[in-house]
Structure formats: structure tokens, C-alpha cells
Image (tube, rainbow, N blue to C red):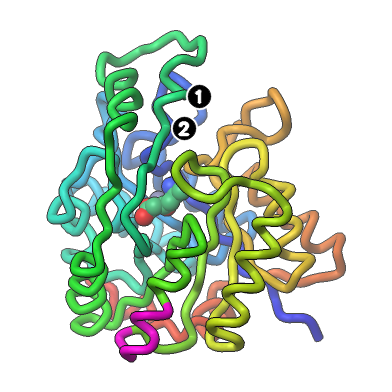
């Protein structure tokens, strides 16, 4: 039987700003509610960032995570996956505040430094509600998303080695797969591990079908069965790429972090709407989705009892 498909849902992220969609969860209560609904709709993994509840700006303060993680934990069995990428102006130290406090089962781990450019979003016609939004977006014209080999190794040691956290390895380009291979060769990362190949971020590999095939072929060649392969694509490529990933034996990530839309020109009203859509597609393909328990087994996660809430 075909492998079950793990649906990850990235609830709010740090790319989109509140003025872009009234449906983007911002406050701890909104993030918790949206995450719970996504889990109920079929997401086995919830990828989580925090935001300042008043301004909606991406925030690193672990007390904000403390307001929503226990609520999600009490209401769902889903795997809580905290960002270590944080927001686009944060230092690596700030990015680690939440993860080091809660020692989650999973964290994202960005596999290389890159230009992470979202400045074109600042020029779209938008009724801006907060002063920080346009400068935040425009600032990415000169922003390097820092993830040096030293940073990656530190995160692996601080979270992985010391606390058994496993990672969603964010690979935005083919070189990031080779960076991951370096850590696998050194046995700092042990199988099974989740590779999130990411398409359509300006500064990374584009959302073209040839690139999906190339990234998959490269991941297969480097890692074979050691890796669980997943796909996310930004913006309008989100659903087509997730569909292709499922058709090719992979896992999928959706959520408002990656796209604010449910179809071309139509804002998604919730994270759960996107989860339901990809779930229906996956099931129509004759595949089954993985429960959180099945996802934990596939990824050898330590279990939620060891998360320090
Ligand atoms: N925003 C995604 C493209 C992270 O949180 O570490 C990548 C991401 C980064 O999820
Ligand atoms: Zn993220």
C-alpha cells in the first residue's frame, strides 16, 4: 500500500502581514484556534510562529508561544513544530527563544543562508494598517537570511542532541540538499528526517515543474529511504505543487504562512480550508492521510510528553 501522506499546516509565519488578509491569525488566541481547526481538518503537523498581538509583527518572545502552545496541546494530538527561522529581522538568538524554552518534538531548520526576498509584496495595492509592514517587507531587498553551517550545527546540538527535537529541513534550493547531506555524513542528523523542499521564494528555486522533479531526484539520490520528502510552494503554486508531491509519493505542506489564497484571486478564509482542500485532493488520488501518531512513527519523534509546556 502507498505510504500515507503527512499534511503539515503552517499557521501564520512571518512573510505575510495583517493588512494582506483579515484571515491571517495574529493573536495567541487566533493562532491557537486556527491551529486546532487545521488539526481537526487533518493536519498531522502544525508549524508555528508567534506574532505581537497588537501590531501583528512577527515576534520571538517565548511568553507569546506560552499563550498558545498549551491550548493547542490540550485540544489536539497534532505535532507542534516551532520555527527556528523566526521573522526576517530577528537574530539567530531571538529565533531560538521559543524552541529552547519548549523543546518541541519538531522545529524547522533552514539549511542555508540566502537572499529571502519578499519586498515585491510591499508594492502591491494594499490598505496598510500598521506602520511596520511596508518597511519590513522592503527591508528584505538587502536582507540575508542567515543560516551558516555554524548556526545549523548549533541548532542541531542545542535542540537535537540535547533535547531530542527533530527537524523539518527547509531546503529552498538544490545546494541546501547538499548542506543537509554534509550533516548526515557527519551523523549529526540521523534518519528518518523530513525534507521540506520549498519552491517559489524569491532568492530560492522557482516553482517550475522541472525544479520539483530535480529537487526530488536529488533528494532521492542523496538520501534514498532515509528521508521523508515533503513539498511546499509559495503563493499560487501551493496547491498544484502539493498535489504533485502527493502524486510522487511525498508529503505536503499548506497554510497561510505559505499562501493567503484558496484559489486564484480568492483569499482563503482559514488554515483549515486549505487543509481540507489538499486532504480532498490526496484522498481523491486514492491515498490516505497520516494521523499524528502515524506521522510520529514515520519521523521517529520523541513524543509530546517530552515537550516542556
Ligand atoms: N516561510 C517558509 C518559506 C521557518 O519558519 O523556519 C519557510 C519557513 C521558515 O517555514
Ligand atoms: Zn515558518
In percent of width and height, residue 275 lies at 64, 51
Above/below status of 25 relative to 134: below
In percent of width and height, residue 199 lies at 57, 50
Quadrant assignment, res 151: bottom left
In percent of width and height, residue 31 lies at 40, 43
Q: In the visual, does 18 lie left or right of 274?
A: left
Above/below status of 16 relative to 302: above
Q: Determine which of the numbered discs, if any, sits on residue 21 in the image.
A: 1
Task: Answer few, some or many: residues within 10 Å of disc 2's Cα (few below 14, many 20 plus, some between 14 and 19).
Answer: many
Q: In the visual, does 295 lie left or right of 99?
A: right
Secondary element type, mark 1:
loop
Residue at horizontal 40 percent and vertical 36 percent from the top? 117
Q: Are marks 1 and 2 in contact (CB under 8 Å)?
A: yes
Q: Determine which of the numbered discs, if any, sits on residue 24 in the image.
A: 2
Residue at horizontal 80 percent and vertical 55 percent from the top? 281
Above/below status of 174 relative to 280: below
In percent of width and height, residue 221 lies at 60, 82
Specify the segment rendered in magenta.
Answer: 181-188
Amino acid at each position: 500500500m502507498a505510504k500515507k501522506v503527512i499534511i503539515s499546516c503552517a499557521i501564520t509565519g512571518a512573510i505575510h502581514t495583517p493588512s494582506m488578509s483579515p484571515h491571517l491569525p495574529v493573536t495567541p488566541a487566533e493562532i491557537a484556534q486556527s491551529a486546532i481547526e487545521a488539526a481537526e481538518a487533518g493536519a498531522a503537523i502544525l508549524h508555528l510562529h508567534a506574532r505581537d498581538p497588537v501590531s501583528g509583527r512577527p515576534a520571538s518572545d517565548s511568553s507569546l508561544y506560552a499563550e498558545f502552545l498549551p491550548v493547542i496541546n490540550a485540544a489536539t494530538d497534532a505535532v507542534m513544530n516551532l520555527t527556528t527561522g523566526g521573522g526576517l529581522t530577528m537574530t539567530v538568538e531571538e529565533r531560538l527563544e521559543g524552541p529552547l524554552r519548549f523543546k518541541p518534538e519538531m522545529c524547522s531548520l533552514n539549511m542555508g543562508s540566502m537572499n529571502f526576498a519578499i519586498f515585491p509584496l510591499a508594492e502591491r495595492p494594499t490598505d496598510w494598517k500598521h506602520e511596520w509592514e511596508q518597511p519590513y517587507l522592503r527591508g528584505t531587498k538587502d536582507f540575508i537570511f542567515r543560516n551558516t553551517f555554524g548556526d545549523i550545527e548549533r541548532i542541531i546540538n542545542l535542540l537535537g542532541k540535547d533535547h531530542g527535537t527533530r527537524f523539518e529541513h527547509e531546503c529552498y534550493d538544490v545546494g541546501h540538499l547538499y548542506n543537509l547531506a554534509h550533516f548526515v555524513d557527519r551523523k549529526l542528523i540521523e534518519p528518518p528526517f523530513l525534507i521540506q523542499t520549498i519552491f517559489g521564494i524569491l532568492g530560492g528555486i522557482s516553482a517550475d515543474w522541472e525544479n520539483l522533479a530535480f529537487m526530488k531526484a536529488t533528494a532521492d539520490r542523496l538520501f534514498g529511504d532515509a528521508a521523508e520528502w515533503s513539498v511546499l510552494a509559495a503563493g499560487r503554486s501551493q496547491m498544484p505543487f502539493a498535489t504533485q508531491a502527493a502524486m510522487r509519493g511525498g508529503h505536503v505542506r499548506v497554510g497561510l504562512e505559505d499562501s493567503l489564497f484558496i484559489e486564484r484571486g480568492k483569499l482563503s478564509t482559514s488554515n483549515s480550508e486549505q487543509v481540507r482542500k489538499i486532504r480532498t485532493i490526496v484522498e481523491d488520488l486514492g491515498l490516505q492521510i497520516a494521523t499524528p501518531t502515524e506521522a510520529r512513527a514515520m519521523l521517529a519523534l520523541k513524543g509530546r510528553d517530552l515537550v516542556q509546556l
